[in-house]
Amino acid sequence: MGNTKYKKIVNFITDKITRGEWSIGMKIPSQRELASLFEVNRSTVITALEELKAEGLLESKMGQGTMVTNNTWTLLGVSKPVNWNENVSLGFHKQSMKMVKDINEIETKKGHIQLGKSELSPEMFPAKQLKQIMKKVTGDLSPLSYEEPRGNYQLRQAICSYLEKKGIFTSPDSILIVSGALQALQLIAIGLLRKGSTIFLERPSYVFSLSVFQSAGMDLRGLPMDREGLLVNEISNNQEGKGNTVLYTIPTFHNPTGITLGEERRKELLHVCEKEQIPIIEDDVYGDLWIDDPPPLALKGRDRYGNVLYLGSLSKTLTPGLRIGWIVGPESVIERLSDLKMQTDYGSSSLSQRVALEWLSSGLYESHLSFVRQQLKIRRNVAVKALSQHLKGLASWSVPEGGFFIWVKIFRPLHNQHLFEKALAEGILLNPGNIYAHEANQYIRLSYSYASFEEINWGISQLGKILRSMQ
Amino acid sequence: MGNTKYKKIVNFITDKITRGEWSIGMKIPSQRELASLFEVNRSTVITALEELKAEGLLESKMGQGTMVTNNTWTLLGVSKPVNWNENVSLGFHKQSMKMVKDINEIETKKGHIQLGKSELSPEMFPAKQLKQIMKKVTGDLSPLSYEEPRGNYQLRQAICSYLEKKGIFTSPDSILIVSGALQALQLIAIGLLRKGSTIFLERPSYVFSLSVFQSAGMDLRGLPMDREGLLVNEISNNQEGKGNTVLYTIPTFHNPTGITLGEERRKELLHVCEKEQIPIIEDDVYGDLWIDDPPPLALKGRDRYGNVLYLGSLSKTLTPGLRIGWIVGPESVIERLSDLKMQTDYGSSSLSQRVALEWLSSGLYESHLSFVRQQLKIRRNVAVKALSQHLKGLASWSVPEGGFFIWVKIFRPLHNQHLFEKALAEGILLNPGNIYAHEANQYIRLSYSYASFEEINWGISQLGKILRSMQ
């Protein structure tokens, strides 16, 4: 039956296309090959291809054969979505975006030396303590269900006690549990801010590598920093109108520069933002990771006007795998955000929340932190020593007082994409500076939190060689 | 120091306001009361109030005293967000939205008879088996970390095997792990569809009670159903243009009607959607919960063109507390959605994913399902019997073949808000029909999955009394 045979070819090809095995733009096998594969006449193949062309899935180009041009989803506009990646006015080159995607992909694979990764090494994963926690959670296992809109009440209580020790006084009603700080930013972007709002932030900033605000139609306006952090008077200089601007800041162990805003600057910053009525988003996910001395009191701890939305998380201090973070702010804001969280995903994993609760309230959090701080100190020192040894005359850096990063300044400008690729060819994954601000192409964000001592040493020595070869 | 005293009042009031203790619109204490509270002259109070008025936080109205009008967040526009709740062209009255919010709030509290809840009763929570699973996960605990963008690979493999038994053949690359079906819809709305797209869906539908599509700027177009489900020919009748329309459907144990689309209708539906090039979102979160006989093969199982995005979840069959669901579709679509998921929350809880993996691959899922099906059968029968006893002459209903709901049709129209409130006064939480389509105000979505037998019986008998009193 010619009809059945031709259908077979149509089905085979549509399967290949719609299962994604044959991707758009790919040249499909020739008519001759298909005829032989299906043991049919070429005329049967042609009939099948004509049907697929009529459906818009294939297209023939003179001299180039037949290509996949579409599938039913792309016909709908999958390749041109509306809300995301469009209207994106990022403060850096397109190339960086591709680089960020590349990094994300390569990071999940094994075998690379991770000198860019913003995560604790598996060596610091507290398997023993977490097993203890899991046993407790398992023993007490009552039915899991949806949690309250703001998250598990006891967890929010535990976060209150934890924050109290840091000088931040709040109540469970002012806390929303989220699936990490990124989700916090996402909820704030879509739920609190107007389209066309301006986000002030440090330049460089980690947030330039994300698309969370830009995708929601907001503009990022980077403000200059000096060695002590954000230049506060730039806020008033750049202010355009009330009710349209918010400040995003990482005042402690800033990502990527590692800088901590001093006591006086913090006071100034709060004062200026209060005066100008600019709400502040304070990202404090690194704050507990001090190495030498505890950092100054968080902005939230000094906030007398409910002007600060404070973000915390277990991702950097324990593990990102739990996907647990929190937002602290005025109740009205938290209520709106929690409503939005419910509309988005009905809340974070109850299981993760119970584990987080035990972790925070058992005292294990504190003892684990002490261990992590010691480890980070050793790692930082290893990295700084290796830098002195292998990058002398090539670059400069400050020794960070906490967090994961050394912001290495290369003396001569260099092509970031080349640097990235050369390092990758040596098996080293680097985060070049232009990810965080396009003019920061003389920088590398060097992480000492993830790679082993040997990897840090070897990686930095290789980096020295690469930099020399690029001079 | 007068200055210190006046500052004290300013701080006290701003604290009250920004901590949300004094909400917007509230009348604050009189000048006299404040003067006595702070032991100052009235002139000091007036100075403080003037400053707060200048900041826009307070406002005096002749004869009405001084009111809270703002806090720094509302000045920014918290009360008028952009992306959400605006441009909302819902197919039902505003009142219903409030009702949904009320239901969500009351549901988390104890003490009500839940005749609307779409969740398995805690009595069916498999604590013993889950403890077993948790022990296994604890024993094998390797460092938790971010998962691959599409989610834990082994879990996706396990979902493939699970789907294979249901007649859906796919590969791990075609699966994205999400935090439940709502997040799936959220990602699809913001990542795949154009603003101004039309979503065809059954009318009534659960999705009318959500704002996920409308908030993203899409229009919901409800299509009529008969007793066998969606009237397929309405799709062609309503079609306006290609590339701008998608169909959302719950073909099996539809929420709220409980209807299952028959074999022939499924074929027709696929055929029409293929012809009109309308992609389908198939929500199958209830599919495993059949009571009498297994339902027909899912649309996805018949999909020859990658035209169907298929949604599944553990929320209805095991527990919503894990926040684990999945999307199955063409690789290109899954890739885009997984990129978006990473941009939104960096993936779902690793811990939940590991538990889900064990649950699906251990065989416990199947045995638990058998138990749940038995229980649902008993519960359904209890509910149907109670309906026959207490709602005879007042209403009619069909006996559902699976899922959680009986769609009860009241013979005489009635005010849904009154019904809701009267039931609530008796301690019964009901989901009236107008939540799911505004013209469905002669209906109640009665859930037999959550309340105990006694509660179902007593609740329905009370419902009968309430309905009689409202005739």
Image (spheres, coloured by chain):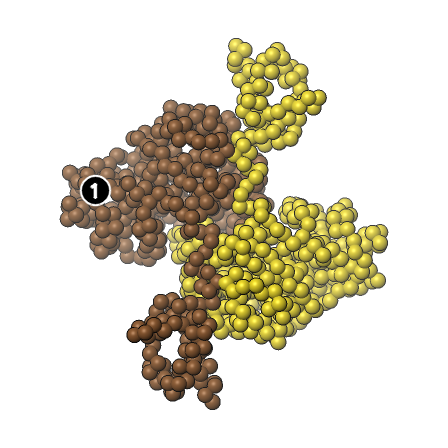
Chain colours: A brown, B yellow
Residue hosting label 1: A413
Looking at the image, residue A82 sits to the left or right of residue B124; the answer is: left
Dividing the picture into quadrants, the one containing residue B312 is: bottom right
| Chain of the residue under the numbered disc 1 shown in the image | A
Q: Position of residue A403 (x, y in %)?
A: 34, 38
Determine crowd level at label 1: few under 14, some 14-19, many 20+ residues with C-alpha closer than 10 A. Answer: some
Q: How many circles with numbers are drawn on the protein?
A: 1
Q: Position of residue A370 (x, y in %)?
A: 37, 38
Tell me the SS state at disc 1. loop
Is there any visible trace of residue A110 in the rendered image? yes
Question: Is residue A210 or residue B452 the one in the foreground?
Answer: A210
Give above or below for B385 relative to A172.
below
Give above or below for B274 relative to B58.
below
Q: Identify the amino acid type marked 1.
A: Pro
Q: Position of residue B201 (x, y in %)?
A: 61, 62
Which residue is drawn at the image coordinates 47% and 25% (left, top)?
A275
Q: Residue furthest bottom?
A: A1
Looking at the image, residue A143 sits to the left or right of residue A208; the answer is: right
Which residue is drawn at the image coordinates 62% and 70% (left, top)?
B232
Question: Is residue A15 or residue B260 the one in the foreground?
Answer: A15
Give above or below for A453 relative to B377.
above
Q: Residue furthest front?
A: A62
Is there any visible trace of residue B212 in the rendered image? no
Which residue is drawn at the image coordinates 33% and 78% (left, top)?
A30
Dividing the picture into quadrants, the one containing residue A48 is: bottom left
Which residue is drawn at the image coordinates 50% and 61% (left, top)?
B326
Q: Position of residue B85 (x, y in %)?
A: 58, 46
* Quadrant that contains the C terminus of chain A: top left
